[in-house]
Amino acid sequence: MSDTKKASDVFIDCLEAEGCEYIFGVPGEENLDFLDSLGRSKKIKLILTRHEQGAGFMAATYGRHTGKTGVCVATLGPGATNFVTSAAYAQLGGMPVLMITGQKPIKKSKQGRFQIVDIVSLMEPVTKYSIQIAAGDNIPSRVREAYRLAEEEKPGATLIELPEDIAEEPTTDYKPLPKSVARRPSAECKAVRAAVKAIESAKNPVLVIGAGANRKLCGRMLEQFVEKTGIPFLTTQMGKGVIDERHPKFLGCAALSAGDFVHRAVEASDCIINVGHDVIEKPPFFMHDNGVTVIHVSTRTAEVDPVYFPQIEVIGDIANAVWQIKEDISPNRDWDFDHMLAYHQAELDHTGKLAADTRFPIFPPHLVQQVRDCLPRDGIICLDNGVYKIWFARGYTAYLPNTVLLDNALATMGAGLPSAMMSAMLYPERKVMAICGDGGFMMNSQEMETAVRLGLNLTVLILRDDAYGMIRWKQANMGFEDFGLTYGNPDYVKYAESYGAHGHRVESSAHLTELLAHCRDTPGVHLIDCPVDYTENDQILNIDIKELSAKL
């Protein structure tokens, strides 16, 4: 005899079959059948957040850490529209996410157009797949398709809208569809051979590691490639940590658009091996018809862009492609990379002097060094967006992949705290820190209550300058009057305590050292209010090129 279930039960069965562990979100009236089914699940835990955007950021970070699809839920209308920013965050950043939203009954409505927005159409530009379920029988195939597309390279966001009347309708004998085994194709041998010939004949090849290379096996292959060839490497912001940045062949992180020490090393190269690059992150060089060969190694062909048009493309599974190149290549005995590596040493010398500045309010380079000294090898920092992101991208040494979580794709504010919360949930044994400007923190600060309720262990370091500091800095650099970018802040110590967290306020450089260690070693949710001095942000670029050239 057939078993009859309501469609929302089938939906949960399908999510369980996919290995879903958590669903983050804020359910509403139109999700109540789904919520009822979820409440009976033995495998999936609901994480109730205080805003849908925070739920989406948490789901995306789950996807970034695990490679598996993070799942979040919201109701119709305003609940669903609150997902837009986190959908774009996941889509541009390459993080697999499934967003589930409710909707009024589609067969018969008694409320006219109340709260109804065409969410499926709204989400199409910022997702890989956006669909409404019109019959419960279709749920297994739609869920399987959403997961497949979310996790397929390049990973991204998917959305399924489950209307209220479809969720409650009875279904019979509809079971989850099993996952298919799909292997990414290997790169063509001729393309590999062309890349190897170009590298071997180059005088000064350099390796650039982008976001698409941030995969476990890929990092291993890249390190073997560097060890065999001796070719130095640099990273984009989202490629940080793919290879341990203490490696003697590390040239730095291209955190700025141009003009930095690392760009001098790239300019000295005649062959750039760009691994996992996506035009979502602008390349750390501007291409010109100047004889430089650019090799694109990725799962997808290069998008033609005004500053990126490689001559050789090696398309296929990145780890396998790097392995093929490594196996074929014979290092050129005439290669000498000392002059390129000298640029990185010059950057270390330049930044080291800044990091030694113990002024109060705290100087950003000193703060970066304090955080690095405090955290263990596998500690995780989750950066919100602001000028401090550049300081950390350039100056914070990443030892392992996904230990510096930042967004250089959508570059949205408000993601730092939810990202750290997800990291603390996944890795309770590791030390986790959210690093936020006061502007970005306040955009999702209500999730402090969620963090406390979940019993997480994490530190929220707020860099307070009482302004939208990065834009204010650019405003000044562009010659505009100081206008429209300053604000007031709450008493952050009391604010943290009102949520049941521990609040601290930095009073000196030495006090910051003490607080970082205390919060690292003490369970619970901690907030550190750290006044910062951004008056000399230009020292990021305060490079004496003549002096540098003389040294080199």
Image (cartoon, rainbow, N blue to C red):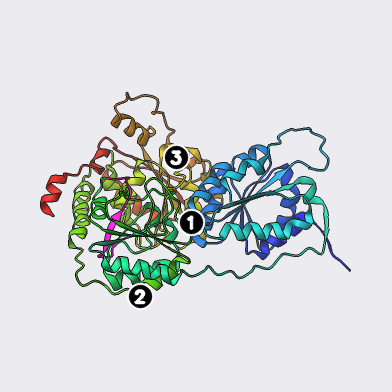
* Mark 2 Cα shell of 10 Å, populated few (<14), some (14-19), many (≥20): few
Q: Secondary structure at mark 2?
A: helix
* Front residue of 132 and 424: 132
Residue plotted at (25% across, 65% down): 248
Tag 2 residue: 328
x 56%, y 45%: residue: 126
- The amino acid beneath tag 1 is Ser
Q: Quadrant of residue 385?
A: top left
Q: Position of residue 215 (x, y in %)?
A: 45, 64
Q: Secondary structure at mark 3?
A: helix
Stretch of the chain drawn in magenta = 246-258
Q: Return the residue found at the far right.
A: 1
Q: Is residue 410 visible?
A: yes
Q: Is residue 376 left or right of residue 350?
A: right
Q: Residues within 10 Å of mark 3 (few under 14, many from 20)?
A: many
The residue at the far left in this view is 550
Q: Which residue is mark 3?
A: 440
Q: Which residue is mark 1?
A: 423
- Is 404 one of the magenta-colored residues? no
- Magenta stretch secondary structure, dominant: loop
Using the numbered discs, state the Cα–Cα distance from disc 3 to disc 2 in whole angstroms: 47 Å
